[in-house]
Image (cartoon, grey):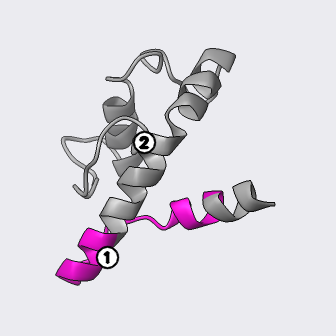
Amino acid sequence: LLHFAFSRSPFSASNGKTAAEVVTAELKKHPPFEGYDKSLTRGMLVKLYEAKDVAKANARRSLIDATNTGEMNPSSAVHKLIDALEAL
């Protein structure tokens, strides 16, 4: 979801849906993921790749905010992994 918007809202089970179903419903709000069903199409992969800089910036922002507030859930350090892989 960090590819599309910044959010530190935790996802949990709600209204008879599991946390995973709640996250999936949020993902389906973003083109081309409307039909997402646990498998990625080429178009979805392209969209994720095109938005990786946005995702990295949002991950950095989430980690900074988590560190400042002392509340680590949710946060992400995935940007560090992506930076390391891109440096290879």
Q: Position of residue 39 (x, y in %)?
A: 64, 28
Q: Secondary structure at mark 1?
A: loop
Query: Is residue 73 part of the magenta span, yes or no?
Result: yes
Task: Give the amino acid type for the residue marked by disc 2 in the picture.
Answer: Val
Q: Is 58 left, or right, of 53 in this rendering?
A: left
Quadrant in the rendering for residue 61: bottom left
Residue at point 49%, 67% (across, down): 77
| Image: magenta residue range | 64-82
Q: Which mark is residue 13?
A: none
Q: Secondary structure at mark 2?
A: helix
Q: Is 11 left, or right, of 30 in this rendering?
A: left
Decide: is 71 above or below 47.
Answer: below
Q: Position of residue 2 (x, y in %)?
A: 39, 45
Decide: is 44 above or below 79.
Answer: above
Task: Give the amino acid type for the residue marked by disc 1 in the picture.
Answer: Met
Look at mark 2 in the image and give the residue it sits on: 54
Q: Quadrant of the C terminus?
A: bottom right
Look at mark 1 in the image and give the residue it sits on: 72
Residue 37 or residue 71, whichever sits in front: 71
Residue at point 40%, 41% (across, down): 1
Kindly report which numbered mark, 1 or 2, lies closer to the viewer in this rendering.
Answer: 2
